[in-house]
Image: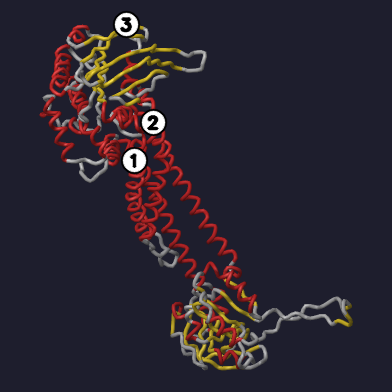
Amino acid sequence: MAEEILRLEKVCKSYNVGLPSETEVLHDVDLRLERGEFLALMGPSGSGKSTLLNIIGLLDRPTSGRLTIKDRDTGRLDDAELTALRGRTIGFVFQYHYLISAFTAAENVMMPMLAGRGFPHPEIEARARALIERVGLSAVADHGAANMSGGQQQRVAVARALAMRPDLVLADEPTGNLDTKSADAVFALMREVNRESGTSFLLVTHNMDLAKRCDRIIEVVDGRIVS
Amino acid sequence: MKRWLPFEWIAAVRFLREGRLQTLFIIGGISIGVGVIVFMSAMLAGLEANFIKRVLTSQAQIQLIAPEQVARPLRDAPGEFEDAAVQRPSQRIISIDQWSMILDRMRGMPEVTAASPTMSGSALAIRGDASRSISVAGVDPATYFAIVHLPDFIVAGEPRLTSEDIVIGTELARALGASVGDKLNVQSASGAVRTLTIAGLFDLGNKGVNLRNAYVALRTAQSLLGMIGGVTTIELTVRDIYAAEDIARRIAASNAVQADSWIKTNAQFFTAVQAQGTSNALIRLFVALSVAFGIAAVLIVSVIQRSKDIGILRAMGTSRGQILRVFLLQGGLLAFLGSLIGSALGAAALVYWHAVARQVDGSELFPLILERSLFVVTAALATLTGLLAATAPALRAARLDPVEAIRG
């Protein structure tokens, strides 16, 4: 049986808790993700996909329920421990690339390693260069992040997400802002990385064609997993 | 990417470099502020040093004189006065009692750098038909010139004071039509007359003083004023001129003398020096405050502009502490760079102003005092101000919720 990376048990999330305007956006969500799985998370806008992704990514805490990442109950961790666990275990790819424009492509990939280690190191630079090469962008490695096309930026974002050798990459509509060709290239890249390294992926998408190419599709409607 | 730079420094420098225009403008603002502080401080220090030099090299910092003479009412019996109305006695010039012992004691005090006995009194300077009333000071040149730098003010002749010499002011020489080498009759109130040779002329920068003051040897004054072996004043200089009043009080409390410090005798001048110091401190404070607010404003804008970057950095595992330090460093770096440029600007302005601004007589308005400590302290305080000013923006950045920050 494959190693379990992520488990959600009866996870609920409410906003404005205790106020008349209290709203529950996630209801008793159960989810399991194993190493090497490539999951698509689908659902209409406002269904709670992003909230679920933020909770899984340790950027937000559930109101109730239990979130376990690699057998660690995250409910018991304080903010600093969550930050450290997030840095080591989870990589993020956002819809709008969100590279830091003050740095080059290679430096953006180095950022998570640099933040974790504190100081630059030849090892960090070598890994960043290798990842940039892996995503096919060696030629623009030293270009400013702002001087690259959307597709290139998103490939750099994928490389950055992989920098810390994470167990899980969370991608929030990573192809939503790209043309079809670039979207296909980015998806293919993530799929390749998934197969090569066994990194699990949880991909939020509205694109059914892409979702069908994933191992499993999870659909969220009104804050519940329906399939 | 510099290998020896920690993550926070790399991020802070890059953020500042990316917001180039914003960074240049705020560094410009800080530089002007620091430049004003350096310029004002150095110029006022120079002006103050000049004033102090002018005032305190032509007079003693503390003067010890015989205590005021008081009439004691006669008492017939305890609680009963023979005459309740006591007339204030006239203050005749008398010698300080046990002056030699007091002088030795003064020289033994660690706060006192020089002590000299003088004999002063009024006399008449007569040459031919012309005469002027003068104040004669009999001094011991060896010790007195360490207190009043008379040789520095000699404009003709020399500051020689043998028993036959007199050194007078330029105005008195003009009034009497005398010059160096001429003889002068000096007559005391008691009628004693000495004929002295004008050894030198001084210009203490004050017309009244140049007309009235005259210096002779201590023994000459003692014999002229009829007080052989006596002195009317012991003049002192002290290590800390601003402690002169305290030292004077202590001396008066433990010796049978009246002690007047320069602070008391030049109350107006001292108040002016103090007022200048206070206004300088206030200017510095307000300039520093405006610099601090400028840094804080720029960094708050930067935090807002960079909220997405902060959110991404947080999502990638950057701790709140690291984010806090990135923004604190930006404040410190801006202020430090600004203080370096500002110090150079302030120094350049001071050198220019020193060359241009002159007194009426053409001498320098103030001495050029550019101490290294001024620049070191200014840079250190500016950097600290930058760090403090960056605290609020840095805390705001560190507290940003990554979800909200990324969503914008």
Question: x, y percentage for residue B238?
Answer: 51, 74
| B54 with respect to B97 (left or right) | left
Disc 2 element: loop
**Same chain letter for marks 1 and 2:** no
Alpha-carbon distance for marks 1 and 2?
Answer: 28 Å
State which tag comes first along the sequence, 2 or 3.
Answer: 2
Residue B12 numbered tag: none
Q: Write down the chain letter for disc 2.
A: A
Q: Write down the chain letter for disc 1.
A: B
Residue B330 numbered tag: 1
The correct choice, above or below, for B78 with respect to B270 in the image is below
The kind of residue on which mark 2 rests is Asp
Q: Measuring 41% from the left and 51% from the top, which residue is drawn there?
A: B381
The correct choice, above or below, for B301 with respect to B116 in the image is above
Q: Mark 2 points at which residue?
A: A78
- In the image, B105 versus B179, the foreground residue is B105
Identify the residue at the far front of this view. Answer: A1
Alpha-carbon distance for marks 2 and 3?
Answer: 32 Å
- In the image, A50 versus B107, the foreground residue is A50
Q: Name the residue under label 3.
A: A226
Q: Measuring 54% from the left and 87% from the top, which residue is drawn there?
A: B216
Q: Are marks 2 and 3 in contact (CB under 8 Å)?
A: no
The kind of residue on which mark 3 rests is Val
